[in-house]
Amino acid sequence: EEVRAAFRLPGVVEMYITANGWAFTPLSSGVGTSMHSYRKLERGFERILLWEETVGRRFEWLIHSRLDLIWFGDHPPLSNLRRDVYWSVAGDDQHVVVPRAIAPPFFRRWSIIKEGRAPAIPETNPGRLMMLTMAAAGIRQGYLPQLYCLELCTRWSCYADRRERGPCRSAH
């Protein structure tokens, strides 16, 4: 109910419930946390904006990364990445590197959703919503190598680990 209360425009909640998909949980079902994650990302971005205003400087890059990732390789140096695209692993939103100049659509997905401007494609997951939102803003994606996976994958096969063997393949 807390998530529903944030929506003011008529029909927006119903549009995302109809679209369904993990990207719109818990609106689209009684479980899931995607909307809460978008809200937290935006709050974090607001703190960044406040810090930048306070010190009179802007970050060059912003990185969103889950804390429960296992890294089995070195992250590519930021100096090797183009600054006109955002960077992720195959559209996965667990680790995303965004040049500051193009960061708002990534970090403001919560507002974009509340305003009814997020693409309501059926069965959308958070990674696909990220890609669609960034594409709608005219921002292209760059691809990082698969150098991480989720830490605790003991009951399922980690979808983010597409290698046959490795430190993150779950033991069944």
Image (cartoon, helix red, strand yellow):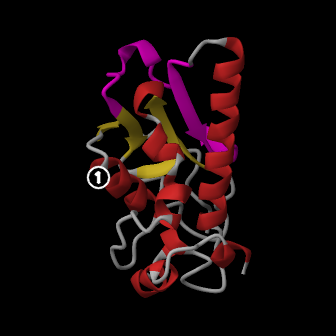
Whether residue 41 is visible, yes or no, is yes
Residue 62 among those drawn in magenta: yes
> Closest to the observer: 109 or 78?
109
Residue at left offset 70%, top offset 13%: 55
Residue 7 drawn at (x, y percent): 58, 73
Q: Amino acid at mark 1?
A: Ala
- Note whether 158 is above or below 32 in the view shown: above
Q: Position of residue 29 (x, y in %)?
A: 59, 85
Quadrant that contains the C terminus:
bottom right
Above or below: residue 19 compared with residue 42: below
Quadrant in the picture for the N terminus: bottom right
Residue closest to the eye, 137 or 28: 137
Give x and y (percent) for residue 137: 31, 46
| In this view, 57 is above or below 52 | above
Query: Residue placed at 53% from the left, 60% from the top?
Result: 158
* Span of residues in magenta: 59-85
Crowding at label 1, few (<14), some or many (≥20) Cα neighbours within 10 Å? some
| Residue shown at 58% from the left, 80% from the top | 27
Is residue 74 found left or right of 92 in the rendered image? right
Q: Which residue is mark 1?
A: 136
- Looking at the rendered structure, the secondary structure element under dot 1 is helix
**Number of disc labels:** 1
Q: Quadrant of residue 26?
A: bottom right
Residue at 29% across, 52% down: 136
In this view, 151 is above or below 129: above
